[in-house]
Image (spheres, rainbow, N blue to C red):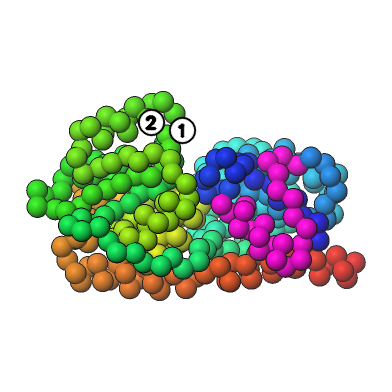
Amino acid sequence: MRIALITPYGREHRNGNWHTAARWTRFLREAGHAVRVQVEWDGRDADLMLALHARRSFASIRAFADRHPSRPLLLALTGTDLYRDIHEDAQAQQALELAHRLIVLQERGTDELPAHLVARTRVIYQSAPDIARQPAPPNTFEVLVIGHLRAEKDPFRPALATAYMPAHSQIRVTHLGGALSEDMAETAELAQAKLSRWTWAGGVPHSTALKRLARAHLMIISSVMEGGANVICEALAADVPVLASDIPGNVGMLGADYPGYFPVGDERRLAKLLSMAEHDPDFYADLLRCARQRRALMRPELEASRLRQAVAEFEQASARA
């Protein structure tokens, strides 16, 4: 099939949406489909549209539905879609109704949808290939945060947590990710100057982030909303357990029984979990065991299979027609 894949962010942004679009493009091309990736649909003929982000891709969704109302339109929902936009934005709500198939990236995603749309929804966990472990830095318990500095990520919560580390702790937290505003950059520089255990390394190539992850002891994701974070997939692929804010998008990725959650905005609880991970071998082993169990859901071959099947449902219908 000729597929128009719409992503609101191009390669230059290096964010989760772009990585998802690039990976899905590869999976679909390997299955024999012709895929064009665009930020906005240019009107060229396509048998199917696969759009990421209900609100940001709405213009393309609307245009495709108007021109080809009977052709399949698949919509993958992001964190801001599920946990904000579809509850308050008319265009995002309209995009849901126009889509023939909805895709959520973790098992809790369907909880946010109107009941009549659940049956047309598929869960496709994102994935990452195995990342070989590398030797950890000596005399350091290395913790990473990976992601751009923006409000939805609550990016300075891990920095604040380091202020509660005991003096003997060897924890060092490094944040990899660019600032999306001058205010964020200024806050990061101030935090780095005042909190000796926290370092802002700025934006780095994806390959560099994965190399750092391969030697880390732990990763933190402190977001206030997530649709199904790529960085969780990558951490589990590197055999790195995660401490995560207790939000539906993270619980949908890591499971209800995962022991590494902390309340949103609670740096003291995060500090407690960090200390436990560093000093309590049983707790760390429990984190690792649970992370390895969830890793089975996030393997590339499974993601590719589920995505191709979602497209194949419509390919088969077209053939019958």
Q: x%, y% of residue 236?
A: 41, 65
- Which secondary structure lies at badge 2? helix
Q: Residue beneath label 2, please?
A: 184
Q: Position of residue 79 (x, y in %)?
A: 51, 48
Residue pictured at 32% horizontal, 39% vertical = 200
The residue lying toward the viewer, choosing from 204 and 47, is 204
Residue 92 placement: quadrant: top right
Farthest residue, direction right: 321
Look at the picture and state if 243 lies above or below 288.
Answer: above
Relative depth, front residue between 91 and 272: 272
Q: In the rendered image of this protein, does residue 309 appear above or below residue 213? A: below
The amino acid pointed to by label 1 is Leu
- Callout 1: few (<14), some (14-19), or many (20+) C-alpha neighbours within 10 Å? few
Query: Residue 99 placed where, x, y %?
Result: 72, 52
The residue tagged with tag 1: helix, strand or loop?
loop
Q: Which mark is residue 180?
A: 1
Answer left or right for 270 relative to 73: left
Please provide percent x and percent y for residue 321: 90, 67
Amino acid found under the numbered disc labelled 2: Met
Q: Quadrant of residue 57?
A: top right
Q: Measure the C-alpha gap from mark 2 to mark 1.
A: 7 Å
Does residue 217 appear to the left or right of 42 in the view shown?
left
